[in-house]
Image (cartoon, helix red, strand yellow):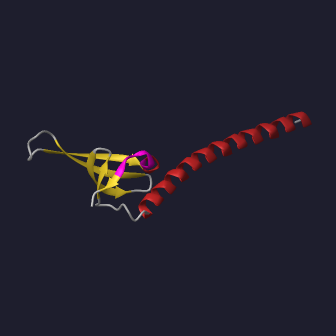
Amino acid sequence: MGTEELVSSVLNNSITTLMIVVILTMIGKDAASKVASGVMFKLNPNFNAGDRVYLGDDEAIILSIGVFQTQFEIIGKLDDNEDCTKRLWRFIPNDRLNYASLSKIK
């Protein structure tokens, strides 16, 4: 193997390694951001699992606050019949909770 081939091989390996590091850094940054959002929401004393909240226009109960997402149970009426209710579950990524209209019901 000549000197030129050796230099070319080292440069190709360096560029490949650099690309892998950049891709892993971008993936890690996104995951770290989502985990940080989850931890911050979980540590927020204003919202806890079991709390009744308005999520937009819907009344909901916070079922669980996870690392990556929060689970809400939406409570509503299917029609005017008081005995007929619907229960829907919404899973919202914690990094998107900043954009959700979330108000606590006291």
Q: Position of residue 25 (x, y in %)?
A: 63, 47
Q: Position of residue 22 (x, y in %)?
A: 67, 43
Q: Position of residue 48 (x, y in %)?
A: 34, 62
- Is the residue 19 above or below the residue 97 in the image? above
| Residue 95 as seen in the image, left or right of residue 103 | right
Q: Position of residue 58 (x, y in %)?
A: 27, 46
Q: Out of 95 and 15, give the one closest to the viewer.
A: 95
For the C terminus, the quadrant is bottom left
For the N terminus, the quadrant is top right
Q: Residue at x 77, y 37 (%)?
A: 12
Q: Out of 54 and 95, give the one closest to the viewer.
A: 54
Residue 77 is inside the magenta segment: no
| Residue 45 as seen in the image, left or right of residue 76 | right
Residue 99 is inside the magenta segment: yes
Q: Magenta segment, which residues? A: 97-102
| Residue 19 as seen in the image, left or right of residue 86 | right
- Is the residue 17 above or below the residue 65 in the image? above
Q: Residue at x 40, y 65 (%)?
A: 45
In the picture, residue 105 is in which quadrant? bottom left
Q: Residue at x 32, y 61 (%)?
A: 49
- Is the residue 36 above or below the residue 10 in the image? below
| Residue 7 as seen in the image, left or right of residue 78 | right
Which residue extends farthest right? Answer: 3
- Is the residue 32 above or below the residue 77 in the image? below
In the picture, residue 56 is in which quadrant? top left
- Count of marks placed on residues: 0
Q: Residue at x 38, y 57 (%)?
A: 65
